[in-house]
């Protein structure tokens, strides 16, 4: 007997790619984004730290000798259309020219 699947729901996935040292109003950008998502009632978000990358602002790397760490970071959340669209302008303002924001439709279960 096959198990009943939970109903599929169309949602939006918001992804921000930046660097771990990026700031918003004197605070870490990824922490600020997580706080925004939580305050706006979005069910969850994840921050993933990368080990290497590059973009318009050059390479992001880990420099052992210089002890500088400014690695790539990805902040991702999935939510209902209304909630994600409701915060998009704020996210754009927070990220500014420091990163890349992508938005895509996803099927969530």
Image (cartoon, rainbow, N blue to C red):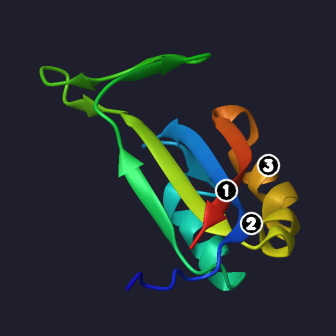
* Percent of width and height locating residue 79: 69, 71
The residue at 50%/85% (across/down) is 4
Q: Mark 2 and 3 residues: CB-CB less than 8 Å, in contact?
A: no
Residue 84: x and y in percent read 78, 66
Any mark on residue 10, and which?
Answer: 2
Q: Earlier in the sequence, mark 2 or mark 1?
A: 2
Q: Is residue 21 left or right of residue 107?
A: left
Which of the two labelled residues, at mark 1 and mark 3, occupies the earlier sequence position? 3
Q: Which residue is mark 3?
A: 92
- Using the rendered view, name the quadrant where residue 106 is placed: bottom right
Q: Quadrant of residue 37?
A: bottom right
Of the numbered discs 2 and 3, the one sitting upstream in the chain is: 2
Q: Which mark is residue 106?
A: 1
Lateral position of residue 68 relative to residue 74, left or right? left
Residue for point 55% across, 56% down: 76
What secondary structure is marked by label 1? strand
Q: Secondary structure at mark 2?
A: strand
Q: CA distance from mark 2 to mark 3?
A: 23 Å
**Residue 25 appearing in the image:** yes
Q: Quadrant of residue 89?
A: bottom right
């Amino acid at each position: 007997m096959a198990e009943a699947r939970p109903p599929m729901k169309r949602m939006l996935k918001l992804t921000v790619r930046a660097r771990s040292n990026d700031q918003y109003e004197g605070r870490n950008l990824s922490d600020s984004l997580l706080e925004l998502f939580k305050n706006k009632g979005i069910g969850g978000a994840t921050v993933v730290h990368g080990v290497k990358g590059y973009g318009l602002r050059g390479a992001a790397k880990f420099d052992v000798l210089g002890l500088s760490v400014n690695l790539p970071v990805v902040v991702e959340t999935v939510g209902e259309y209304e909630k994600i669209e409701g915060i998009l302008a704020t996210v754009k303002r927070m990220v500014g020219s420091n990163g890349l924001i992508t938005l895509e439709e996803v099927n969530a279960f």
